[in-house]
Image (cartoon, rainbow, N blue to C red):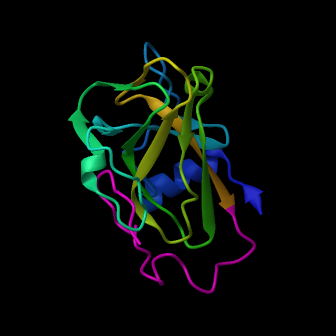
């Protein structure tokens, strides 16, 4: 298994729409950087956020998840309450080839502020917008900026194509378009 370079990511994004929209270089300026890096792609967070709320004093149950556990906001800046959690999605849509596994790591700018980004691996054959999970581990409110970089996606090439891809088994998160809540 090898980590794939910027050349491969660029080629696959141009030829096969693997990442769309695609930035060929790191975009910085006054933003938290996003775009192509040496061995990965820094994705952006969209402006739709689902912020956990305790208004209804409900239990968070992955087998019986209630949308009332969240407040939905469309905004350029999201404030995560202390020791709380937010769901969002990437600006970019991904289309993962059948011999590739993608892992995601949070950007150091947010990690150094106590904001943890979690994304489960993107499996071979999966496509859609990625749901991002943000945890604020601090006792203070924390801010996330929409349309700026939040996480780096690293592409790993398997030794061969799997017998069954995510698309083949009709995975429950295939083709998601917005922030997607838990499914069983």
Q: Position of residue 106 (x, y in %)?
A: 58, 36
* Residue drawn at x 39%, y 37% as measured from the top left: 45
Q: Which of the 4 image quadrants contains residue 164?
A: bottom right
Give left or right: position of 75 versus 36: left
Q: Quadrant of the C terminus?
A: bottom left
Compared to residue 155, the image places residue 52 above or below, namely above
* Residue 77 screen position, x and y as percent: 32, 23
Where residue 183 appears, as percent x and y from the top left, is 38, 67
The image quarter in which residue 52 lies: top left
Name of the residue lying farthest toward the bottom:
163
What's the residue at 54%, 39% (across, down)? 117
Q: Which residues are magenta?
A: 157-184
Image location (x, y in percent) of residue 180: 34, 56
**Quick one: quadrant of the N terminus?**
bottom right
Front one among 86 and 166: 86
Outermost residue toward the top?
Answer: 30
What is the total number of numbered labels drawn onto the structure image?
0
The verdict on residue 169 being magenta is yes
- Residue at image position (54%, 79%) is 165
The dominant secondary structure in magenta is loop
The answer to whether 50 is drawn above or below residue 97 in the figure is above
Query: Is 148 part of what is drawn in magenta?
Result: no
Q: Residue at x 28, y 34 (%)?
A: 47
**Vertical arrangement, residue 66 with respect to residue 78, above or below:** below
């Amino acid at each position: 298994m090898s980590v794939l370079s910027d050349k491969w990511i660029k080629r696959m994004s141009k030829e096969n729409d693997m990442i769309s929209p695609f930035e060929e270089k790191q975009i910085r300026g006054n933003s938290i950087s996003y775009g192509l890096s040496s061995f990965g792609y820094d994705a952006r967070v969209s402006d739709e956020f689902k912020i956990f709320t305790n208004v209804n004093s409900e239990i968070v149950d992955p087998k019986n998840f209630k949308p009332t556990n969240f407040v939905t906001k469309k905004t350029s800046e999201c404030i995560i309450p202390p020791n709380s959690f937010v769901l969002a999605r990437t600006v970019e849509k991904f289309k993962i080839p059948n011999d590739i596994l993608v892992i995601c790591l949070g950007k150091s700018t947010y990690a150094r502020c106590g904001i943890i980004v979690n994304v489960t691996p993107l499996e071979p054959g999966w496509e859609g917008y990625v749901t991002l999970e943000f945890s604020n581990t601090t006792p203070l409110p924390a801010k996330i900026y929409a349309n700026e970089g939040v996480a780096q996606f690293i592409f790993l090439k398997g030794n061969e194509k799997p017998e069954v891809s995510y698309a083949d088994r009709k995975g429950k998160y295939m083709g998601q378009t917005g922030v997607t809540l838990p499914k069983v």
